[in-house]
C-alpha cells in the first residue's frame, strides 16, 4: 500500500499514488503550477521562489514581493506603511511611524527664528522638546515651557492644579551632586537609588524630568497617565494610544498651548 503524507491518504498501488500526485492540486504550486512529488519538495520550492506573509496566523504564500505588498494593503492596511513596505505590530506604532520625520513634513517652525533659530519639527511635541532641552538660541528651559503651558491651560484640562504651588506655578528644584552621593562603587541617586559611573551623569539624572512633579495628566477617564513634561504629554496625545485626541476639550487646550508656544518669541 502506498501513502501520501501531504494528503494523509493511502493508495492501493504505487501507480495510483503517482496518478494522485500528477493530478491533485494539493501537490501543485499555486503560483507557477509546478507539480511536486512530496511536501518537502513543494516547501523547498516555495521558500526558494516565493514569499510568505509573516503576519497571518496561517501560512500564506504569495508569488513575489509585489503580491505581498498588495496582500498587506488589503489585509493589514490599518498598520501597513505602503511607502516603506513595512507592517507594524499595532495601529499606534504605525501612526507614530507615519508622524515621524521619515514621512511627516517639518512644518512646525521654532518661534525663535526671528532670533536666529533655524529649527523645524514634525510635530508640536518635537517643538516643545526642543524648547525644553535648552538647546534653542532663545535660552528657553523646561521651567519656561511649563509656565507658559500652565498659563495657557486656564480650564485645567491637562494641568493638575493640585500639583501646583502658589500663583499657579510648578515647583522646580536644582540639584548639585556632592561627594556624599558616592557609595563606594558608583554615584547613587538618593531619590530612586539609580547609579551612574560619573558625578556629571548623576547631575544630569537629578536635573532631568525623572524626578520633577508630574503636573500634566491625560483627561481620558480610562487613561489618567501623568507626565512631567509638556512634550511627553503631547507625544501621548499625538500617538492616539488612548483616543484622547478625539476630545474637543483636549483639542482646544492643545491649540491654546501650541498657539502660546508660537507667540512666545514676540
Image: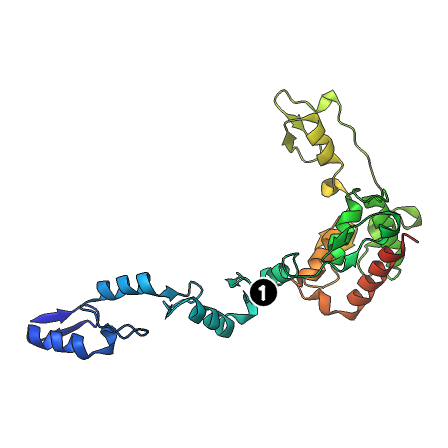
> Can you see residue 131?
yes
Q: Is disc 1 placed on a helix, strand or loop?
A: helix
Q: Which residue is mark 1?
A: 91
Q: Nearer the viewer, residue 131 or 117?
A: 117
Circle count: 1
Which residue is located at x 78 percent, y 28 percent? 176
Does 9 sit left or right of 60 as displayed? left
Q: Position of residue 232 (x, y in %)?
A: 72, 52
Q: Quick one: quadrant of the N terminus?
A: bottom left
Does 4 sit left or right of 117 as displayed? left
> Can you see residue 230?
no
Q: Position of residue 127 (x, y in %)?
A: 77, 53
In the rendered image, the vertical position of residue 92 relative to residue 203, given as above or below: below
Circle 1 residues within 10 Å: few <14, some 14–19, many ≥20: some
Q: Nearer the viewer, residue 20 or 102?
A: 102
In the rendered image, the vertical position of residue 262 relative to residue 5, given as above or below: above
Q: Quick one: quadrant of the C terminus?
A: bottom right
Q: Position of residue 220 (x, y in %)?
A: 72, 63
Which residue is located at x 88 percent, y 51 percent? 114
In the rendered image, the vertical position of residue 82 relative to residue 265, given as above or below: below
Residue reaching furthest to the bottom? 23
Judging from the image, the colouring scheme is rainbow
| Image quarter of residue 80 | bottom right
Q: Position of residue 154 (x, y in %)?
A: 89, 60
Amino acid at each position: 500500500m502506498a501513502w501520501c503524507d501531504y494528503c494523509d491518504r493511502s493508495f492501493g498501488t504505487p501507480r495510483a499514488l503517482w496518478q494522485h500526485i500528477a493530478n491533485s492540486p494539493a501537490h501543485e504550486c499555486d503560483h507557477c503550477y509546478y507539480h511536486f512529488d512530496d511536501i518537502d519538495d513543494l516547501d523547498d520550492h516555495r521558500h526558494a521562489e516565493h514569499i510568505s506573509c509573516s503576519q497571518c496566523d496561517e501560512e500564506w504564500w504569495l508569488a513575489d514581493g509585489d503580491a505581498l505588498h498588495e496582500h498587506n494593503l488589503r489585509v493589514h492596511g490599518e498598520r501597513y506603511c505602503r511607502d516603506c513596505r513595512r507592517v507594524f505590530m499595532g495601529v499606534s506604532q504605525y501612526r507614530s511611524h507615519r508622524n515621524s520625520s521619515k514621512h511627516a513634513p517639518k512644518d512646525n517652525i521654532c518661534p525663535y527664528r526671528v532670533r536666529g533659530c533655524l529649527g523645524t519639527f514634525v510635530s508640536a511635541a518635537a517643538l516643545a522638546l526642543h524648547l525644553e532641552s535648552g538647546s534653542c538660541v532663545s535660552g528657553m528651559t523646561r521651567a519656561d515651557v511649563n509656565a507658559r503651558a500652565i498659563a495657557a491651560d486656564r480650564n485645567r484640562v491637562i494641568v493638575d492644579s493640585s500639583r501646583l504651588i502658589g500663583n499657579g506655578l510648578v515647583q522646580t528644584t536644582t540639584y548639585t551632586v556632592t561627594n556624599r552621593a558616592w557609595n563606594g562603587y558608583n554615584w547613587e541617586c538618593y531619590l530612586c537609588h539609580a547609579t551612574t559611573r560619573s558625578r556629571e551623569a548623576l547631575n544630569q539624572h537629578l536635573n532631568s524630568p525623572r524626578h520633577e512633579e508630574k503636573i500634566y495628566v491625560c483627561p481620558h477617564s480610562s487613561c489618567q497617565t501623568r507626565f512631567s513634561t509638556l512634550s511627553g504629554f503631547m507625544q501621548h496625545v499625538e500617538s492616539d494610544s488612548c483616543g484622547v485626541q478625539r476630545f474637543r476639550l483636549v483639542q482646544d487646550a492643545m491649540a491654546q498651548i501650541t498657539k502660546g508656544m508660537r507667540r512666545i518669541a514676540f
